[in-house]
């Protein structure tokens, strides 16, 4: 990847823009103070983008038959199509993004569990996705999405940033993507896939091995499946297996004492005594001492800038 910052879309109110229905914002300190040092944010407010004023009457999602509509109860206006069309309108820009941070609970931007009202009873279930967010996902199925509230969870935060960086690597591949480029990309992803989703790790490897021809549809489905496999944080158990797998590469080089030290550290991580950074730091140390081309290119070992400090609490 070149050194240009990755671009990440974001709901404008999360950067402190006073664009919400009540004229306020929902500034996310993590996004505005920390993540902004590493990515270039591109902000969008779909509701302002479709011409609604600030402040404005609230929008709510209503279920009509099997369809979800965005309605302004005060005026009766239905803004579903306009909010959906706004995602189409920004699609050229969205294709350049490596991720998107959405504002939780919003009928336009919410990623999940947005209130969906039954217009007859007035009761709501938290089960919908915002109209803009749903269309954004439909148009960009591999694009990593996350909500501001979920980013307060260290595991979800780490997972989102990881996906953004992997997707950024994908976007940086020269187009059209050759089989060699795809195989190189896959090789670098291998330990990440092993840690996140072992069935996908096996299936994607097999699919690539059997592919005779790589065309755009194949490449597109491949990256959708990779991003899906990475979409859940890796479990402690799977990280432990992956670390032990890495340890196997040093078999012939480490002394008995060094092997034991690394094994114990991996087990202490597994038992919650040490963070994952402890065995990983030792592995990186051994990697400098005993260079290994395969391990050196694994994004698992260094997936994103170190000073984001995302793995310290894991
Ligand atoms: S949640 Fe989305 S639509 Fe609502 S103010 Fe924020 S950016 Fe605008």
Image: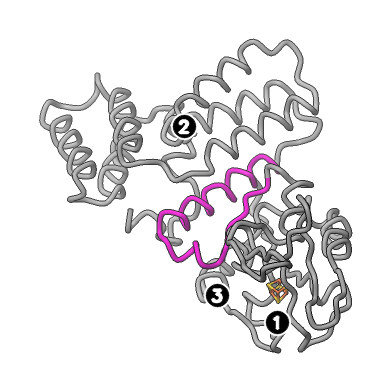
The mark total stands at 3
Ligand 1 within 8 angstroms of badge 1 C-beta: yes
Q: Which residue is mark 2?
A: 197
List the single residue furthest toward the left.
Answer: 257
Eyeballing the image, is 191 above or below 53? above
Q: Which residue is mark 3?
A: 28
List the single residue furthest toward the front.
Answer: 121
Indicate the position of residue 206 as horizontal and vertical percent values.
Answer: 57, 15
Q: Which disc is residue 20 wearing?
A: 1
* Ligand 1 rendered quadrant: bottom right
- Residue pictured at 32% horizontal, 26% vertical: 245
Front-lying residue, 106 or 189: 106
- Residue pictured at 73% horizontal, 10% vertical: 212
Displayed quadrant of residue 14: bottom right
Helix, strand or loop at label 1? It is loop
Q: How is the image coloured?
A: one colour
Q: Main secondary structure of the magenta part?
A: helix
Magenta-colored span = 143-171
């Amino acid at each position: 990847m070149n050194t240009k910052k990755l671009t990440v879309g974001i709901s404008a109110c999360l950067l402190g823009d006073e664009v919400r229905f009540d004229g306020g914002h929902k500034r996310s300190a993590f996004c505005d103070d920390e993540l902004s040092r590493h990515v270039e944010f591109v902000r969008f407010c779909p509701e302002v983008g479709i011409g609604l004023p600030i402040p404005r009457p609230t929008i709510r999602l209503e279920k009509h038959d099997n369809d979800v509509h965005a309605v302004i109860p005060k005026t009766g206006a239905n803004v579903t199509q306009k909010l959906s069309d706004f995602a189409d309108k920004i699609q050229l820009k969205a294709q350049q993004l490596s991720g998107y941070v959405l504002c939780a609970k919003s009928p336009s931007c919410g990623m999940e569990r947005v209130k969906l009202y039954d217009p007859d009873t007035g009761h709501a279930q938290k089960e919908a996705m915002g109209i803009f967010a749903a269309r954004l996902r439909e148009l960009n199925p591999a694009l990593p999405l996350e909500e501001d509230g979920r980013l307060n969870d260290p595991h979800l935060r780490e997972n989102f940033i990881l996906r953004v960086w992997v997707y950024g690597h994908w976007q940086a591949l020269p187009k059209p993507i050759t089989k060699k480029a795809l195989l190189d990309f896959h090789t670098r992803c291998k330990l990440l896939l092993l840690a996140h989703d072992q069935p996908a790790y096996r299936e994607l490897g097999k699919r690539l091995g059997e592919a005779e021809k790589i065309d755009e549809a194949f490449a597109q489905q491949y990256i959708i499946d990779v991003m899906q496999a990475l979409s859940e944080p890796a479990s402690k158990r799977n990280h432990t297996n992956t670390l032990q797998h890495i340890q196997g590469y040093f078999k012939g080089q480490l002394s008995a004492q060094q092997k034991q030290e690394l094994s114990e550290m991996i087990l202490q991580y597994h038992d919650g005594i040490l963070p994952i950074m402890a065995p990983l730091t030792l592995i990186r140390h051994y990697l400098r001492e005993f260079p290994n081309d395969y391990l050196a290119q694994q994004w698992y070992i260094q997936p994103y800038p170190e000073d984001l400090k995302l793995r310290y609490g894991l």
